[in-house]
Image (spheres, helix red, strand yellow):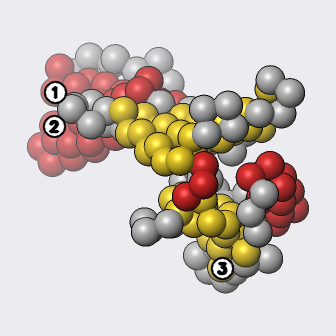
Amino acid sequence: MNAAAMTSDHLIFRQDVLGSRRFSNYWWAIIASMGGVGFLLAGLSSYLHTNLLIVSDTSDLIFIPQGVALLFYGVAGSLVALYQWFMIALNIGGGYNEFNKETNHVSIFRWGFPGKNRQIEFTCPLEDVQAVRAEIQEGLNTKRKLYIKVKQRRDVPLTRVGQPISLSDLENQGAELASFLGVPLEGL
């Protein structure tokens, strides 16, 4: 979660959730784009017997098998890069958590993949929220997540997918939200 904001005399608590527009996704999209295009141009250079790359001369490579392998890796890398740029453009996983005491509702919104379920929204009355739960699992696959416990439903995740947030941020965000909602904080 990025920023938490309280407005209207502390009646609305809103947390923005960072989706796929993270620095790491931009980094890997740029790396995959450069690698994919480089391999693609190297494979085409070996087929056309002309140098299409500025960095090195690949026109002397034999097309079969080296050029074909380079073309395959170039197409694969370019498709991975295209997928990553597509995810970044659509901001998959981005959205917000809003707790509104004026309307007495909780609204959790996320952007999904294109289609009829592109907008993923969960709403419930504020009275149905029983607790804020923190899940902390250390080790090789570290998990640090915040959930809200809702009556007669599964726990609803509040934190973003990906890199786990720090323990102090998790504790602060959970305590701030639990205090705003007037419910207990579990799991810490």
How busy is the neighbourhood of tag 2: few (under 14 within 10 Å), some, or many (20 plus)? many
Gap between marks 1 and 3, in whole Å?
Answer: 52 Å
How busy is the neighbourhood of tag 3: few (under 14 within 10 Å), some, or many (20 plus)? few
Identity of the residue drawn at 53% across and 63% down: 150
Residue 14 is left or right of residue 24, and the answer is right
Kindly identify which numbered label has been placed on residue 137: 3
Residue placed furthest toward the bottom: 139
- Tell me the kind of residue under disc 1: Tyr
SS at circle 2: helix
Labels 1 & 2 near each other (Cβ < 8 A)? yes
Residue 23 is left or right of residue 13, and the answer is left
SS at circle 3: strand
Identity of the residue drawn at 47% across and 18% down: 54
Residue 31 is left or right of residue 99, and the answer is left
Report which residue position mark 2 lands on: 63
- When the figure is inspected, residue 172 is found, relative to residue 124, above or below; the finding is below
Kindly identify which numbered label has been placed on residue 70: none
Gap between marks 1 and 2, in whole Å?
Answer: 5 Å
How busy is the neighbourhood of tag 1: few (under 14 within 10 Å), some, or many (20 plus)? many
SS at circle 1: helix
Identity of the residue drawn at 49% across and 37% down: 109
Gap between marks 2 and 3, in whole Å?
Answer: 51 Å
Report which residue position mark 1 lands on: 47
Residue 88 at x, y percent in the picture: 47, 30
Residue 44 at x, y percent in the picture: 22, 25
Instruction: Identify the image quadrant of the C terminus.
Output: bottom right
Q: Can the viewer see residue 136 in this picture? A: yes
Camera-side residue: 139 or 154? 154
